[in-house]
Amino acid sequence: MPNERAKGSVGSPLPHDSAHLHVSGGALYTDDIPEIRGTLHAAIGMSERAHARIKSIDLTKVRAASGVVAVIAAKDIPGKNDYGPVIADDPIFATTLVQYHGQSMFAVAATTVGEARRAARLAAVDYEDLEPTLTAEDAVEAKSFVLRTEHLVRGDPRGAIAAAPHRLSGKIRIGGQEQFYLEGMVAYAVPKEDGTMHVYSSTQHPGEVQHQVAHALDVPANDIVVECRRMGGAFGGKESQPGLFACIAALLAHETKRPVKLRVDRDDDMRITGKRHDFVTEYEVGFDDDGRILGVDFVLASRCGYSVDLSGAINDRAMLHSDNCYYLGNVGVRSFRCKTNTVSNTAFRGFGGPQGMLGVEQVIDDIAQALGKDPLDVRKLNFYGVTERNVTHYQQTIVDNVIHDIVADLEQSADYRERRRAIRAFNAKNPYVKRGIALTPVKFGISFTATHLNQAGCLLHVYTDGTLMLNHGGTEMGQGLFIKVAQVVAEELAVDIDRIRITASDTSKVPNASPTAASSGSDINGKAAQAAARKIKRRLTEFAAQHFGVAPDTIAFRANAVHADGKSITFDELVKLAYFARVSLFATGYYRTPKIGYDRKTWTGMPFYYFCYGAAVTEVAIDTLTGENRLLRVDILHDVGKSLNPAIDMGQIEGGFVQGVGWLTTEELWWDDKGKLMTHAPSTYKIPVASDVPPVFNVRIFESGINAEDSIHRSKAVGEPPLMLAISALHAIRDAIASTVDYALSPRLDAPATAEAVLRSLDDIASRRAKSAKSKVATEVA
Ligand code: MTE
Ligand code: HPA
Ligand code: MOS
């Protein structure tokens, strides 16, 4: 029957469930939770050295400072002095060794935030300085690694490169990126009766924070409840590292028997917490006359910082995305996981995937330049086939390849060829401002590569007035997960979405939940919620069949009512009757992603359930006198399968792209030669602002998109993949730089392409051009 769907079911472009609260100030973030009487405020005492032995710490002045109630260091921890998510190498407080500038050494609880922060600066620390290792390149030289070096090989890359008609090699430095979530790290620990504790934490992984706090306090997990209603952004930065702040708040709460809140300020947050890994990628490639890659060898070196954190999985994902959309028959990927005396780098949207992809994208660009071809033609030539040349370098067969359709559509709709001609004409006429264009594709694998994390749970209640309460293991960070999962429940029970109260992530409701990460939130929590709703629906169906005296298969749920044989009853009435008949009205749901699994020893198998695809065309202008760049026009076509919520998905595509542009063009992290981060505030660290959004921004969802696998309503994940569409902006800038030498050379341009980097690249290409002109003259004279 038409118009009989309930309001807000799957596919509706609903606004974010908290939009009205976000804009009115009504949304409660952790720092907004009304403080309990007696609440203390904490601050962290941070290392002033990147690498040093701590000979002594004198905290006398800290303890004596005004308002101070407690000061704690490693010896005051009842349990384990560690919050490492995978390996125990992240001390809560450094003891005898500091390994990065900003590392936590002790903490203070005081009556006010200001008093705590002032006191934390009064420690007298006697350091014995050690030589810091700061960059990935220095670490490779010194053989300083956090994990062993990995090597993935398919075929015979060295042999294929040696035998190829053409060869090239190159190198790109890829910068890191600060997550710059608007809400900084914060935790509020509230002691409860009998040694238990309730911790509010801004975290993507409440279950992990629960364990970290339990270990620090030396209590069992069931003594700790961790709750997070929402985060003001996370972007991967809150996948593993909120544990430090939660542990410190909990330790001080335990010590003082009072509630303790720890909210670090922006500068300290940036100094203490990990960022996207910066990479140095080197490659050698052999190719044929058409530009087909015959063999390619990558060496990736990433700066992991002082500890392991999530660096294993991040570097694995970089290796697994070194192909992007391209069939690489003979390929080697070597991955160095470098240990440095800097913050422990961590998850950031894309989780190593973007860095992995940039290597092969530059390979393609360089091949095109060497052969005098349009890079788009070389890209297309190397795309995975749909039914042949469709096995990845880790032996997963790609069964859902839609990149050909997406790129063909975008090439037309963005008028790529004609605009490239127009840009050449523009550049010929304009001596200082140069334009460039690039179309780049994205293929991104969906599933946690740590296979066990691909599971989720849900707890769903129906109350006797016909309203519902929804809880699941996912967390809300602005990405719209909660509304999507609520839509799944509304669809399943055919009830209006405004009957569903969405509740905070809470370890006492759904246990052992995975982090909300790897873009898998709606996939796995959506399926778990569907399973819970189906249980309740089954019970209500049976009950309704009895009630009407009909067979269960004639019962239909439609538009807030239940129908059978021309008879109907409202959902509310049915629920009430079911309660009196003693039918259970709450259920749990559980889901684990099928099919996946791979062998990390041989690097073969199926790490990903499916792939997301997209492509972008970006046109830029650069000013060759100042190095500035500006995006003029961006066209995006992105595959989200059958969208659960196209409004949310559009926001993710636009936001992801712009965040990627920030990574590749303006966001530069800079440490001084002592290892002190100097870009620790928005004054020196430039994220995109509204005026950086391109004036022409045509974003479309790939309408024929459908998940080839049985995902939740055939949708696809959307959180991370669009970030990598921004590679088109970097390549458009490369194209504009190449125009200054009439496209005769391939630019050397590291990311981010800041004004300074563009100027350096322009100087470099001009001097290489002059040298080659000189040697040509010399040859002719001889
Ligand atoms: N969108 C907003 N607004 N804020 C965020 O912090 N994080 C991104 C992405 N989109 C993020 C975001 C990252 S890193 C991931 S992994 C996904 O959202 C996580 O949510 P999902 O799995 O529900 O897509
Ligand atoms: N993505 C994001 N987070 C993760 C992953 C992943 O693949 N594996 C473990 N944590
Ligand atoms: Mo996202 S980097 O997987 O939290």
Image: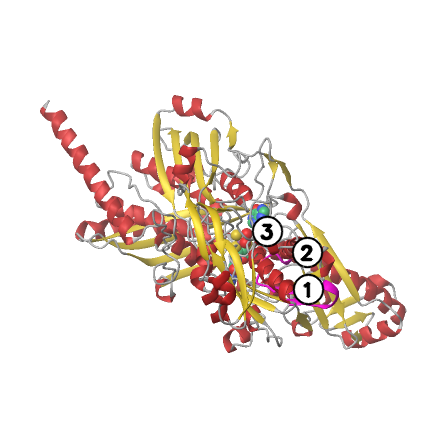
Element under label 1? strand
Query: Is 747 on the left-hand or right-hand side of 72?
Result: left
Q: Where does label 1 land, which residue? A: 197
> Where is residue 562 shown, x and y percent of the image?
78, 71
Which mark is drawn over residue 527?
2
Earlier in the chain: of badge 3 and badge 2, it is 3
User: Could one spot residue 650 in this view of the protein?
Assistant: no
Q: CA distance from mark 2 to mark 1?
A: 31 Å
Q: CA distance from mark 3 to mark 2?
A: 31 Å
Q: Residue at x 44, y 42 (%)?
A: 340
Q: Residue at x 51, y 26 (%)?
A: 155
Please report the bounds of the magenta region as a residue range.
190-207
Q: CA distance from mark 1 to mark 3?
A: 17 Å
* Nearer-the-camera pick, 189 or 700: 189
> Label 2 near label 3: C-beta < 8 Å?
no
Earlier in the chain: of badge 2 and badge 1, it is 1
Amino acid type of the residue that numbered disc 1 sits on in the rendered structure: Met
